[in-house]
Amino acid sequence: MSQTTGTDRIPGLEERARRGPVLRKGVGVSPSGWFDPRGRTIGSWAFAANRITGLGLVFYLYLHLGVLTMLLAGESMWNDFIELATNTVFLLLDVLLIFGILFHGLNGVRVALVGTGIVPDRQKALFWAFTVIGTLLLVYAAFHVLGGE
Amino acid sequence: MQTATDQQAVEAIETRRFHVFRYKRGDKASRFDTFDVPLAERMTLLDGLRWIQLHQDPSLMLRHSCLHASCGTCGVRVNGREVLMCVTDVHDLGLDITVEPIANIPVLADLVVDMEEFYARFPDEHPYVRSSEFNPQAPTPDGIPTYVRYEDCIECGLCLSACPIAATTDRYVGPAALAAAQRMLEEPRGADTAGLLDWADEPDGVWRCHAAFECSEACPSNVNPAARIMALRGALVGGALVIPDRMEDAR
């Protein structure tokens, strides 16, 4: 006589096993894909901003490497570029870059603290704490980038 | 015959405009139908949709059962946010109310989704019905012999609908299944705990979550699935399998 295990009593297991792990998508899947802003809260906005800043930083990395190849073209070209890169518009873009770095980095620390179970229920408190820290750092950095001493 | 006074009385009735998601198998695409629903005192969203069924379109399909947020069958998205129809007051929803089925689960018809797809995500060991558990040690008020332990999750699927990661991949098992696994590990009652941890320790398991915490925001039963996922991660990286019994209240 075989022993009855707990799983034998669950109906539909065989059918579920036959269907395999891949689930089909239906029309119920939100058309906006990974981010539907309606009704979402701070966690989703942080998640979305993290993705956008991540993509921005990857784009910047390749842009940066591309710009550095100007050095191969000689001193004159590089000096011309530096002159362009120190005008106000470019410096504002630098501030935007610093925002991206700060947001992505600090949000990564927040997710790591929450996601490793160290503070599993304090994601919002950490978000606002890191927002304050990040804002202070951004103001400090912007002050220096835009010509303050 | 309707008099002018009757007509004025009808016009004076306050209404809400419902935009309801419609889809039947065989339709090439989904659409939204609009209904003007007369507002009644203490009218729930479910009352409004049943009014539409009774008075305007009997082909509208929806699911409900208990009428008091215990069965989890009447989950929908209203103006983009996941709710249970039976406990959502229409007065709180504004003049235009958009009702859609919960997301990330295939639609069978109108507001009815295929919950088989939801249950298929759960670990095989998960017992959907657990034996009643009594706690004779706990002091009880007069007239109550003992407490019966209930599980909080009502398997409504709102957490899966709210999860932004579930919208990117149908391989992610989702918050409800992971919360169920954590709950079983918290109180195994003979379950294979090592097997459950292995089940959760997969790229499309506990590690696919990106900590948006929308599942905990959407949960109508205070299960706090996100914190349970984080607790599972904590356990998998060598920590204790402990979840706090509180939700952050700041929204």
Image: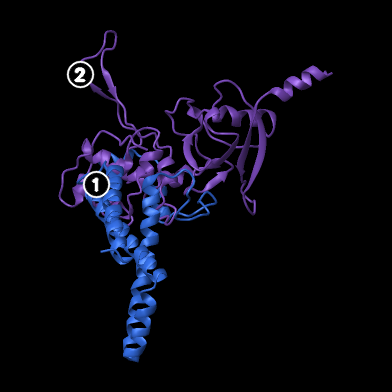
Chain colours: A blue, B purple
| The quarter of the displayed image where residue B203 is located | bottom left
For the C terminus of chain B, give its image quadrant: top left
Q: Residue A120 carries which label?
A: none
Q: What element carries label 1?
A: helix
**Chain identity of mark 1:** B
Eyeballing the image, is B140 above or below B18? above
Q: Which residue is drawn at 65% across and 31% down?
A: B52
Q: Name the residue under label 1.
A: B232
Task: Note whether residue A66 is visible.
Answer: no
What amino acid is labelled 1 in the image?
Answer: Leu
Eyeballing the image, is B92 above or below B182? above
**Residue furthest front as drawn:** A149
In primary-sequence order, the first of circles 1 and 2 is 2
Q: Mark 2 points at which residue?
A: B138
* Residue B207 x/y as whole percent: 29, 54
Q: Which residue is drawn at 54% across and 21% down?
A: B42
What amino acid is labelled 2 in the image?
Answer: Ala
* Residue B64 x/y as whole percent: 52, 31
* Residue B119 x/y as whole percent: 40, 43
For label 1, count other residues whose C-alpha is less than 10 Å away and answer few (under 14), some (14-19) or many (20+): many
**Chain identity of mark 2:** B
